[in-house]
Image (cartoon, rainbow, N blue to C red):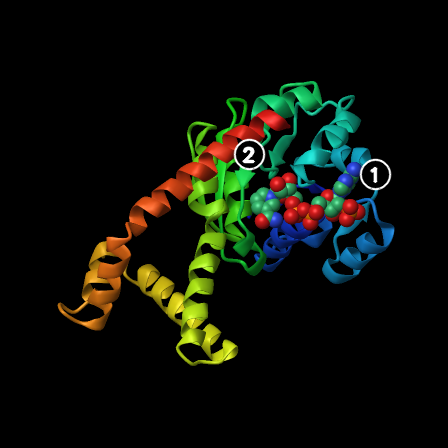
Amino acid sequence: MEQRKISFIGSGNMARSIFAGMLSSGYKATQITATGRDESKLKHLCDCYGIHTTTDNNQAVEKADVVILAVKPQMMAEVCAQLQHLDLSNKLIISIAAGISAQRLNDMLAQEVALIRVMPNTPSLVGKGMSGLYASDKVSEDDKDFAGDLMAAVGEICWVDEESGINNIIAAAGSAPAYFFLFMEAMQKEAMAQGFNQDTARLLVQQSALGAAEMVIANPELDLATLREQVTSKGGTTAEAIRTFNEHHLSDIVAQAMQAAVKRAEEMEKLI
Ligand SMILES: NC(=O)c1ccc[n+]([C@@H]2O[C@H](COP(=O)([O-])OP(=O)(O)OC[C@H]3O[C@@H](n4cnc5c(N)ncnc54)[C@H](OP(=O)(O)O)[C@@H]3O)[C@@H](O)[C@H]2O)c1
């Protein structure tokens, strides 16, 4: 990956997962700065990762080629207000904050910047993330490549052409780990009701989920329906379970849940 000077404004869970991924992909620690409010947390980061740390957001932004805004959405206006007096015209700004539009970020920074919005998800913390990216008009192809490589350090990436696509990314990937947790939770509960202890029930479910996901990845030429059909013998036990899901309209429930996630993302954009 190209080695640019990069500063993370905010160094919580998501920032840490990204720079940890970058470091394990060979990015130089000396090129990375992370900011935060708590000196002791920053010292810990410095000791663990060898990166620069500071409580001074201005200083971190001034020296960076790329700035990653990684504070909570509700902190973003305050943090951006501190940066308004800086000339950001030669910097790539990446925001990972959910629910803050590019226009709103430009307003918060009081200037029009080369901005990429990234929507990562929590499996980024274990290097298995799925990130959606949207680039505003001012972003060069070079900067897009850089941002793509950056997020590829913690998983897979997907670009959207329209900013509204970020909300669809939230529905299909950002919120999706929780859908799978919910499904696994329900399976664990029923496995326990059928006599397994909690640990065994969890093992049965988690290993099946992992195996199914690995099979999907290992067979890109097979669509998901084919994979399902291949493990569903006519008149067998799986067929009976699938018939029950279909009888209760599982795919309608999933569609409604994903539409509800998009609607909520749109509402949240109006709140910040
Ligand atoms: N976690 C996810 O799954 C996920 C997924 C998609 C998008 N995101 C987005 O990622 C962003 C960060 O989320 P997170 O989960 O990493 O949150 P987090 O763990 O709470 O991290 C936020 C960080 O911001 C720091 N901070 C707060 N105010 C600051 C200031 N004025 N100057 C510098 N640093 C400041 C906090 O420092 P202190 O600890 O000192 O307060 C903390 O290190 C959010 O905008 C969220 O929407 C997260």
115 versus 26 height, above or below:
above
Q: Please tell me whether mark 1 sits on a helix, a strand or a loop.
A: loop
Residue 213 in sight: yes
Please provide percent x and percent y for residue 134: 49, 33
Q: CA distance from mark 1 to mark 2?
A: 23 Å
| Three-letter amino acid code of the residue under disc 2 | Arg
**To which residue does mark 2 refer?**
117
Mark 1 or 2, nearer chain start: 1
**Which quadrant of the frame does ligand 1 lie within?**
top right
Crowding at mark 2 (Cα within 10 Å: few <14, some 14-19, many 20+): many
- State which quarter of the image contains the C terminus: top right
Crowding at mark 1 (Cα within 10 Å: few <14, some 14-19, many 20+): few
Identify the residue at the far right of this view: 39
> Which residue is more in the foreground, 110 or 260?
260
Horizontal arrangement in the rendering, residue 68 relative to residue 119 (left or right)? right
Please provide percent x and percent y for residue 269: 57, 28
Q: Give me the residue at 54% from left, 52% from top.
A: 153
Please provide percent x and percent y for residue 135: 51, 30
Mark 1 Cβ inside 8 Å of ligand 1: no
| Three-letter amino acid code of the residue under disc 1 | Asp
Please provide percent x and percent y for residue 237: 22, 72
Q: Quadrant of residue 218?
A: bottom left
Horizontal arrangement in the rendering, residue 237 relative to residue 12 (left or right)? left
**To which residue does mark 1 refer?**
56
Q: Give me the residue at 62% from left, 32% from top.
A: 92
Q: Quadrant of residue 165?
A: top left
Residue 223 in sight: no
Q: Please tell me whether mark 2 sits on a helix, a strand or a loop.
A: strand
